[in-house]
Amino acid sequence: MESLKQTDPEIHEAVLNETNRINEGLELIPSENFVSRAVMQALGSIFNNKYSEGYPGKRYYGGNKYTDVVENLAIERAKKLFGAEHANVQPYSGSPANTAVYFALLNFGDTLMGMNLAQGGHLTHGHPVNFSGRAYRPVQYGVDPQTHLIDYDAVRSLAEKEKPKIIISGATAYPRKFDFEEFHKIAQDVGAISMADIAHLAGLVIGDAHPSPFPFTDVVTTTTHKTLRGPRGAMIMCKKQFAEAIDKAVFPGLQGGPHEHRIAATAVCLKEAMEPGFRDYAKQIVKNAKVMAEELMGLGFKLITDGTDNHLMLVDLRNKNITGREAEAALDKAGITVNKNMIPYDPRKPFDPSGIRLGTPAITTRGMKEQECREIAGLISKAVDNCKDDAALEGIKGDVKELCKGFPVY
Ligand code: DSN
């Protein structure tokens, strides 16, 4: 990074510091991951400089011969990997991708049904402060107050009563499997479009570690930077009948020039995901999460739904006498990065909720397995027990650093 060092030493230093932070610490935010050098190289490539408004073969700018190669490869790989009829790889990220779907397929004021953010959903699934909850009429389903699982009968009743035009499945903090087939059936029965937002699950889906929403779901969105292990960005995949409307909504409806360097990096991550090793990776993510969950419960932590089937855990900290914000801060001091998170029916507020969210995609990428996950659970427990003792947290940070030494990120 000599050029960066000379041009902007402050940014250079921040990059080095961040590199040390990830190498010496444990990244347990379930939506984060570490991409390969090849993905990084595509992301930092010459395609950053190109304008290519339009789609392959139909651009509003000249000089797009090689841009078309890149975007076509990303599209074809996405279709092949997921078994999709159509793919649009231009959305800048998950929120613009979801917004594009609504813009394409709904009229303002139409009813949109999605999972409540406070119970595991996402802002763009109809939260009242978000565009999706203001431009459309949001109807929200959640989880059962006792089991904290999605009650599919309750989802069906709500859909029958409210007659949404689109039903969104998918979440950001739901530790169990989604029954995408059941969601599609409910949508069909009430005359709605079925949409799955698999941002968190995409890597697990193609690695056969979670059931797929294909080929039956009408529209599927995903970010590319979570379990899929690609650049920050998103894709929309859909049945052919929705393709034209969705492409038009992305461009020119919502976006201008696509970020082709990022699309090149998406193509690379999709190629990597076609390798047999990616299946092992996806399955290991889930194995790691299950072991960490078991170990944490053995140490007295209460996990929402008493465990996990996927890459994430939602921990209810109320029996530990610590809030989510306090735990996040204490763990940060110990070199363990997590995020505070609302638990279902949380009596506290989002900025200082009762829970934390943990996940295994990033530590699995760096090669950690069951044994390390047991150790990590012990370190988390120790940090929570000593959350007010900075010297103890510093000591745990040393243990974390020692553990990480055997698993360099780059
Ligand atoms: N912000 C993402 C997450 O952390 O789950 C969802 O978009």
Image: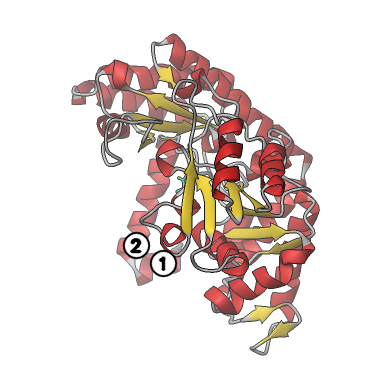
Q: Which mark is residue 275?
A: none
| Residue 116, x across and y down, in percent | 45, 43
Q: Residue at x 80, y 51 (%)?
A: 83
Q: Amino acid at mark 2?
A: Ile
Residue 11 tag number: 2
Does dot 1 land on a helix, a strand or a loop?
A: helix
Residue at 29% over, 17% down: 320
From this viewpoint, which residue is outermost toward the front? 161
CB atoms of marks 1 and 2 within 8 Å: yes
Q: Quadrant of residue 361?
A: top right
Q: Nearer the viewer, residue 39 or 361?
A: 361
Q: Where 190 sits versus 396, above or below?
A: below
Label 2 element class? helix
Q: Which residue is mark 1?
A: 4
| In front of the other: 276 or 186 | 186
Q: Nearer the viewer, mark 1 or mark 2?
A: 2
